Amino acid sequence: MGDLTHLTISELQAGFRKGDFTPADAVRALEARIQAVDPQIGAFLARDFDSALAAAKKADVSQPLGGVPIGIKDAINVLGEQCTCASKILAGYKAPYDATVIARLKAAGAIPFGRLNLDEFAMGSSTENSAYQITKNPWDPTRIPGGSSGGSAAAVSARMAYATLGSDTGGSIRQPASLCGVVGLKPSYGRVSRYGLVAFASSLDQIGPFARSTRDCASLLSVMAGKDPHDSTSLDLPPEDFTSRMTGDLRGIRLGIPREYFVDGMDPRVRAKVEEAIKTCETLGAELVEVSLPHTEYAIGVYYIIATAEASANLARFDGVRYGHRAKNPTDLLDHYRRSREEGFGSEVKRRIILGTYVLSSGYYDAYYLRAQKVRTLIRQDFTRAFETVDALVCPTSPDLAFKIGERVNDPLRMYLADIFTIAANLAGICGISVPCGLVEEKGTSLPVGLQFLGKPLDESRLLGIADAYEQAGAKEILAQIP
Ligand code: GLN
C-alpha cells in the first residue's frame, strides 16, 4: 500500500475506487504521521482520530469527496467541535452548528478532521499571535509557516492532511501557502458562504482550500461554492466544475505583470524565482504584458483602516456573556465586560480593536474610514482597468521567504508588510491563488517560494486552469519534495 500521506486527493480517490486502500487506511496514515510529526510542528489545536475513523468506515467513495479527510482552521464552526479562533476568549467554546462550507463538504462525503492553529482571530502573518502555540514551518522548524492560516498550510506541507480549509482576509491563505510550499486558493468575494466562519472583516473575508495540487483546490471549491441564504453576500451562480479549463497550456492567455509588484526591498532570490516562473508561463504559450496598478502603495494603509474598523464591530460580540471566557466576580456590568475582554483578547487583537474604534470615531471617520473607502474604490478600479487588457495577473505571493520565529513579533509594521502583494486582491474582491515556484537554499535548508496568479472576479475556472498549467510544468517537482 505504501505511505498514503504523499498522495493528492485525486490520487487518494483513485485508490479508494480501485479498492487499493480504504478511507479508514487514509485516516490511519494521517494519525501515524500526525503522532510522529506534529509534536515538532504544532499545526493542530485539537484532533479526534476515533470520530474520523468512524466516519471513514461509513464513507461512500462514489461521492464527490467520499472518505476524504479535510483539516479545518479553528475559526470555522464544525458541529460539536471546539472553535477557539486561537483565542483565550473562546476557550472551551463548542460549535452549535456546521458552517455552510462544512455542511457542503459533509454532504459530498468529506470528513472534516482536526482543528488547525491560526493567529488569534486570523489577525497576523506568522501564526505567532495564537494564544495557544506557535506553529513551525515544516521546511525549517526555526521559521514561521506564515499566517494567519499557518496551521492549515503547515499540516498540508508536512503531510498531516491531504487538504485543509483556511480563510483569507488580506492574504491568510495565499501567504502561508507560499511560505510552506503548497497550493492555496482565495476565491472571489461572494463565491463561498462565510456562514459559520468567525467574522474578522466582513467585506474582505473568504474561505478557501489548501492542497498539494491546483486540481484538488478546484475539486474542493466545486463543492464549497454557491448561494447560501444564511450569507447574503454569497452570490447566486450556477454550479461549476472548476477543473473544466485545465488544458495544460497557456496558449491564448494574456498574463499581466504588475510593475508595482516587483519592488526594491523584496528578497532578490524570491524575485529571481518568480521571474523564472513567468518565463515558464511564456514557454507554455502565454503572452506577457506589463501592466500598472498605480494605487498599490496605498493598499496596506487602506486595509489596516477598513479591516480594523470591521473587526472592532465584529468582535464586540465577545462580551463574556454569550461565548467563552468570563471574568470572575465582576463588581458591575461594565467591570464584567472590561475584564472579560481584557483577560480574553491578546495584544494584537486589542491593537486592532483600538485602531478600528479610533478610525470610526466621530471626528476621525471622514479623515480615515471614509477616505480609505474612496481609495479602496481606486484600488478596485486599477484591477478593472488591468483586466480590460489581460486575462490574469502573475506576481510574487510574498516579498520574502519564511522568516525566523520571533524576528518580527515586536515590529507590527514590518509584520504588516508581509501581505503587501496579497491585500489588494481582498480589497478588490478578485480571486487569487499561490502555487509553489521554486526553492531557495538558505543556510543548509531549502525554503519554498510562491507564485501568485490573480483573476477577474468570479473567473476562478480560468484562474485554476492557468495555475494548473503552470503547476504541471513548473511546480510538480517542488510539490513532490514536500518534507
Ligand atoms: N496578515 C493580515 C492581517 O493580519 C491578513 C490576515 C488574514 O488574511 N486573515 O490582518
Image: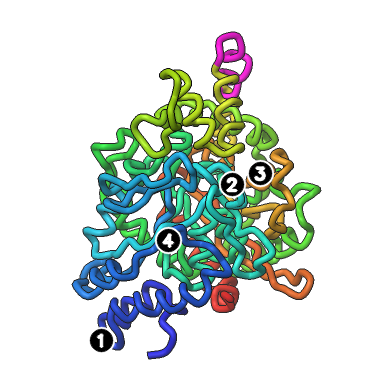
Local packing at callout 3 (Cα closer than 10 Å; few below 14, some 14-19, many 20+) is many
Disc 1 marks which residue?
Answer: 19
Q: Pointer 3: what residue?
A: 420
Q: Earlier in the sequence, mark 1 or mark 3?
A: 1
Q: CA distance from mark 2 to mark 4?
A: 20 Å
Residue type for callout 1: Gly
Say which residue appears at 42% left-offset and 42% top-offset. 90
92 versus 54 height, above or below: above
Q: What is the secondary structure assignment of the residue under circle 4? A: strand
Principal secondary structure, stretch drawn in magenta: helix
Percent of width and height locating residue 338: 50, 24
Marks 2 and 4, the one that precedes in the sequence: 2
Magenta residues span 361-373
Q: Nearer the viewer, residue 473 or 255?
A: 473
Identify the residue position indicated by label 4 in the image: 164
Q: What whole-number distance in Å separates the C-alpha atoms at marks 1 and 2? A: 43 Å
Q: Is residue 452 left or right of residue 24?
A: right
| Mark linked to residue 129 | 2
Ligand 1 occupies quarter: top right
Give the mark, 1 or 4, whose residue is nearer the N terminus.
1
Q: Residue at x 34, y 48 (%)?
A: 77
At a point 51% along the width and 51% down the height, the residue shown is 118
Mark 3: amino acid: Ile
Q: Earlier along the polypeptide chain: callout 3 or callout 4?
A: 4
- Specify the quadrant that holds the N terminus: bottom left
Give, as a three-letter code, the residue at label 4.
Thr
Instruction: Judge whether 412 appears above or below 438 on screen.
Output: above
Q: Earlier in the sequence, mark 2 or mark 3?
A: 2
Q: Which-is-in-front pick, marks 1 and 4?
A: 4
Q: CA distance from mark 1 to mark 4?
A: 24 Å
What crowding class fits label 4: few (fewer than 14 Cα within 10 Å), some (14-19), or many (20 or more)? many
Tell which tag, 2 or 4, sits nearer the viewer: 2
